[in-house]
Amino acid sequence: MDILSLLSPDSIIFKLAIALFLGLFIGLRREIDIQKEGSESFVGFRTLPLIVMLGAISTMIPQIPYLPVICLLGVLVFLSIAYYNGVFKLHLIGLTSEFSTLIMFLVGVFVGNGEYIVAILVTVTIGLLTGFKDQLHKFARGISPQEWGGALQLLILSAVVLPFLPQVAVDPWGVLVPFDIWLLVIFISAIGFVGYFLQKHIDSKKGLIVTSFLGALVSSTAVTTALAIKAKQKKDLPRNLFVVALLVAVATMLVRTIITIVVIAPIDLKIVALIPAAMFITAVLLLCVYGRRQHADKEEAIVPQLESPFELIPALKFGALFIVVLLAVALGKEYLGDYGVLITAVLSGFIDVDATILSSLQAFKAAGITQVLAVQAITLAIIVNTLVKIVYVWILSRRDVAIMNTLTITIISFVGLVTFLFV
C-alpha cells in the first residue's frame, strides 16, 4: 500500500485522520474553556476526538449495518450519566456540552460516509457556538423583543410564504415575478442586517471611521446625513476627519453594490461590476491621501438612526420601492423607450441604489431591456446615488467639509463614468 492510496479520500486512514482532526479541533476549545474557568467537564481534548472517531469507525463495518445506531445509543447513555452527574453532584445547569458531544459523534458518522464538507461545516458551526458564547450572550441581551418579533415575522413570510409565491410574471410586461422579488428583498435585507448587527453590538466609541463603515452597510445615505450634521456641530474637529468618514461611507456603499451585482446579475451583466469596482478603488486611494492627514479622537462616533432591515416593515418598504421602480422601468420602456428607463434610473438613484440595480437586472432577465440599456441604467443609478451625497452635505454640514466632499465625490463619479465608456 503506497502513500497515495493512504491519502485517498475513500481510504480508512484518511477518514480516521479527518475525524481525529475535527475532534481535536473542538476538544481543544473545550479544554481551553475548562482551564480558563477552572471547572470540571466530562469531555475535553482527549475524549472528544475518540467520540468522533467512534462515529467514523461505526460506519466502516458493513457486516454490522446498524452499528452507528448502536454506538449512538451508547453515546446517549454516556451523556445521560454525565448530565445526571453534572446536575445533581456538580450543580451544573446546561446541555450545551452534551448536545455538542452528540453532534460531534454524528460528525464522525458523516466523515465515515465521505460527507467531508458537511462534517467540516457542522464542526465550524459547533466551534462558533462554543467559542463565542460570551459574545453570543451579549448579542442576545442587546436584541429587543420588537426586533426579534420583526425577524420572526420576516422568517415566517420567507419560509412559509416564499415557496408558494408564483415563479412566473404576473404583470403584462413580464417583469413582476413575486418569488424573485421577495427572494431579492431577503438578500438585500441580509446584507443590511450584517451592518446593523455590527453597528449595534460593536462598541460605539470606535470613532467616526468605524461607525461610518458599519452604518453604511445598512444605509450610506443615513450615515452621510449623520456625518454632515455632526461636522456642523463639532466645528473643533478637523475637516479631513469627516471627509475620510464620508469616503468610507461611499466606499462601503460601492462594496455593497459590487456584491449585489456579482451575486445576482446573470453572467452577461457581471461586467458592470467593474464600474463600482473602479469607483471603490478611487475612494480607497483618496482615503490613503486624506487618511494620513487626519487625527481622529477615538471617543468621537456617529450613531445614525437605522431600522433593522431584517424586520418586516423595513423589508416591506424596500419590497414596495423595488416593485415601484421595476414597474417604472417597464412603463418607461413601453412609452418612452430607452430614455424612459434612463430617466427612471436617475430619479430612483436619488432614493435607493439597490432597488434600481435589482430592477434593472430583473428587467434584463425578463428581456424587457437590452444588455446595453441595463448597464447604462445601473451606471446612472450608482453615479446619481453617489453624487446626491454632495447635496446632503452642502445642506446639512459646514462649508469646508462640503467643499472637500464635493471634490472627492466628483472624482469618484468621474472615474465611474470613464470606466463605463470602456465597459
Image: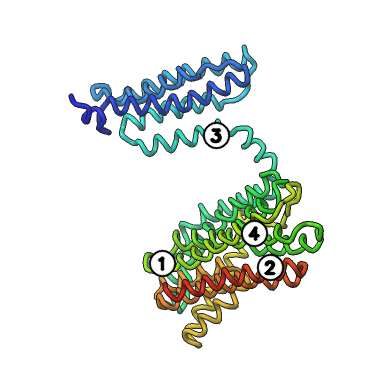
Of badges 1 and 3, the one in the foreground is: 1
Indicate the colouring scheme. Answer: rainbow
**Mark 2 or 3 closer to N-term?**
3
Tell me if 358 is positioned left or right of 212 in this view. left
Frontmost residue, 111 versus 240: 240
Residue 141: quarter of image: top right
- Distance from label 2 to label 3 (Cα)? 45 Å
Disc with the residue nearer the chain's start (3 vs 4): 3
From the top left corner, tell me how far across and down residue 203 is, in percent.
70, 44
Tell me which residue sits at (55%, 68%) in the image: 355
Q: Which residue is mark 1?
A: 271
Residue most toward the left?
1
Residue at (45% x, 74% y) in the render: 375
User: What residue is disc 4 on?
Assistant: 290
**Number of the front mark, 2 or 3:** 2
* Mark 3 lies on residue: 129
Q: Which part of the image, by quadrant, shows the C terminus?
A: bottom left
> Is 191 above or below relative to 129?
below
**First in sequence: mark 4 vs mark 1:** 1
- For badge 1, the amino acid type reads Ile
Residue type for callout 3: Leu
